[in-house]
Every structure is written in structure tokens, then in C-alpha cells.
Amino acid sequence: MAKLSKNSPVSLDALIPREAFEIKDQPERNMGRSILTISIRDLEESSFFYPFLRKPDFQRETNEWDAAKICEFIESFLDGDLIPAVILWRGSSHYFVVDGSHRVSSLLAWINDDYGDGKFSKLFYDGNITDEQKEAAKETRKLIKEKIGAYKDYQSLTSQPGQFNPKMLERARNLGASAISLQWVEGDAMKAEESFFKINQKAAPISETEMRLLLARKTPNGVAARAIVRSGNGHKYWSDFTKEKQDEIEKVAQEIHQLIFQPKLSNPIKTLDVPIVGNLSSSDKLELILEFINIVNNISTDNQLGEDLKGDKTIELLKECKKVAQRINSSDPSSLGLHPLVYFYTQQGKPKIGSFYGVVSLILHLQQTKSWSKLIKVRKDFEWVIWNYDMVPQLVAKKSDALQARELVRDFYLEVITKLSGGIDKKNVITEIRSGDKRFSTLKIPKKADTGEIVSKEFSRETKASAFIREALPGWPVCKICGGYLPCRFNSIDHITRKADGGLGTLKNAQLTHPYCNTTYKN
């Protein structure tokens, strides 16, 4: 398992449940009677406070803090340092955290020994906790044990004080008197929501993607994006739909997630079995999937479709995305079996998001024009060109954004297909394209990777990945029909002489092909 960096985020999202913010016909309350502080005991599961604590259903994931920051905050609480007040709003039956979810969740994680892999998290994620999340939890627990001690140790202090050091005894006394200050938002749900967005755009601004999803949280593309990124687990933004539709959303979302993000990408690359999309941060994953959904379903603005009240539109969008993901690389008969490394990575093994958007756009074009055969006929040389002459970074730079460059990348790929179809030698294709289309006239042939000045005797991860790819890819199996590279997990065994023509199921009559080449193109 790859070791995480010191700044790897820790998932605390399961510790405060979410609840819908919109509370209608809420009676007026005397806010002067609300409590002004909460103690550590108030956050225990058996208290009268924690069971009623919630965060808004549109709240971003509580996963911004790393192990060091969580540990530092708990230390500050134990040592009686000044901690900013947590801001709450009182709904009809719950206390909603408007600001301070990371602070409260950190204490809850300490109390329950749940840093993303404990009792609450296992229930929240239906047991599907990623290796990265488990490793982050392990590192956090280790740091907490070294610098602070577990909460259960402090609970044992009163009965066994002699077994603990003076620092822990001092902190235990502080625990009995320490409390977190509370501020309360007065007004209705609309006022509380306004306060949430205003506060959360100050000290720790919500990312642009998160803001888009928060504002589009009830749209079908917003719900679908959350479902895919979390593989149908976590907070169920689709919980208002019928059980049957919830199950279908989770099933399709899990399938899409696996097709796009599995297997996990090792660093450095030591296998050609890589995912379509490599390791990304949570926010980058959200952005990529939201854009993927919008591109596939021709959605120009996030709120274009309005709210999805029944779930039908969400399911429709997911199914369209599944078709495209299957077309890229799967065992489905429609699958082109695009080798992820060739199409979506650099020769140094770095993921290319611009290529992902471009290939999705290319697939939609080929589907609309029913011109799959044009690609298949020249696929071997097409892959040679895009691998040896990687123009995507230059095309993305022209538009300053991978998403905005998707149509330019698509058109470049189409030009490559057209030139190859016209008999242009693969080594001359780029020259022909540059001279024939002003959009591509400034493209430069990429030079071989320059390792630059060597300052260490050790190989870098990039060098290790490059060396492996250089040695492994040239000898990798290719489709016996089109000549394109075969992906690692998804291929088809084809009869060289068709069964209809008397071909037998013998080893001599078997060949490896892409699913589409076997089931459709050949016939």
C-alpha cells in the first residue's frame, strides 16, 4: 500500500449525521434559553445533546483536516486554549452546525476512536471504506496515541491515576471544566442557510466545485455526481426517492465508479493495469465526475434540469454515463477497450484529465455519427500517433482549461483519424494537420522527456514509472482484429474462423480481441 503524505485528509464525515435544512411551519423559540457551551460529556453518544446534533444535508464533506491538524485541535482543547465558538441553528427537532463541523467532528472522532474507519464510519459507508481512508485513520490514531492518548485512557484516570503521566492527569482535570462556546443563529431556515454560505466563504472558502454542488444539490446531475464519487455510499442525497430507485442509483453509481477509478493507481506505476482516471483529490474527483455527467448528457449549466423530485432523471443520467464508461473500457460487447495508459496518461505515468474529457467528447461524436469503423480501421496507427506525439497538454494550454479544451482535443483526434484514413503515413500525420488546419498550426512535436540535472543517486518515482512503461508497453498484447492495445482486464476471445463458418473452439482457432471488434466490427 502506498504511504500517504503527511497532509492526507482524514474523513470525519460520518460523525455528525446530515439532515434536511428546510423546516416548515417552525414555531418561534426563546433563543435566550439555549445553552451557551457544550462539554466533552455532551458529545458522548449517551448524552442529551449529541443524538440531536446534525449538519445541513448540503454541507460539504468533513474531510479538509489532516492528522496533524486534528491532533493539534484536540491538544488545544485539552490544554484550555482559546477555541472559536461553534455556530448552531436550532431546527424543529435538531441542532444544526452552521460553522465548526471540523472542530466538533475532531472531538467526536477522539471520543469514539473513529477517524474514518470506526463504528460510525463503517455504518455510514456501508463497510466500503477505501484503503486510503483506512491508512489516513491509522496514521491519525498513531499520532493521537503518541501525543495525546486515547479518550478511553482519560476515562480510566479517575480509577487508576497512578498509571498515567502528570501531563495526562492535568489534561484530565481540564476536561472536567473545559467547554466549547456556542453561538446561535436566530431566524428561520432561510436565514440559517444564508448564514452558512456567508460564514463558509470566509476563513476556509468552499471550493468552486463544492459550491456548484451545494447549489445544485437537488438536481439530477448533482445527486448523480455525489453517488458516483462515493460509489453509492456515504450520505444518501437520494434518500427521498423510493427504495427501488435508491437501490438502482447506488447500483449504477457503483458500476460507473469501478469502471472509472478502479483499480487503484500505484505510485510509481508498476503495472499496466491502471484506472481510466488516476489518483485525484476529493474536490478534483467531484469536478471531473460532475463535468463528465454534464458532457455526456449535454447539460450546459448545473441547474439546467431543475430539481429531481422522484429520481427518474437521476437514474437516466447515470445510465447514459454508464454507457459511455462501458464504451471506453469494460467487458460489455460495446466496449472499445481503450487501454487507459495509452489514452489517459503521459509517458511518465501522469494522468491527463484533458485526454479524458477529449475522449469522452470523441466517443459521443462517433456515436452520434455512427462512425465507429473509421476509428477501428486506423486504430493501430491512431494509438501510435497519440502516444508518441502527445499534443493534449498543448491543446489544453490553448484554452487554459482541460474542460474548455475538450472539443479542441476531440477535433484533433478526428483530424488524426481522417489523415490516417486518407493514407497519410503515421509519422507525417502531425505535419499534415499543422499545415492544413490553423487551429493546430502552432503545435510543436514534443521532445523526448528530459530528466534535467541529476541531483540524487536515487531514481525518482517519475523515472521509475517511465522506465517500466518504456519496457512493458511495446510488448503488450494487441487486438488481432484492429491492432490496438488490449486493456488488462477486459478483452474477448474470438473465433478466427467464425462459428457460423464452421470454426471450432480450439486453441488454434482462438485470438484475443477488443469486445467491440469481436461482437460488432468483425461481423
Image (cartoon, rainbow, N blue to C red):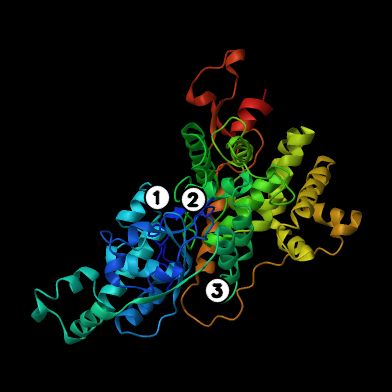
**Residue drawn where x is 30% and y is 73% of the image:** 39
What residue did someone put label 3 on? 204
Q: Position of residue 19 (x, y in %)?
A: 46, 53
What residue did someone put label 1 on? 125
User: Label 1 is placed on what type of residue?
Assistant: Tyr
User: Label 2 is placed on what type of residue?
Assistant: Arg
Tag 1, which secondary structure? loop
Choose top left, top right, bottom left or bottom right for residue 471.
Answer: bottom right
Frontmost residue, 506 versus 15 = 15
Q: How many marks?
A: 3
> Distance from label 1 to label 3 (Cα)?
26 Å
Tag 2, which secondary structure? loop
Q: Which mark is residue 230?
A: 2
Q: Earlier in the sequence, mark 2 or mark 3?
A: 3
Image position of 86 with respect to 344: above or below = below
Tag 3, which secondary structure? loop
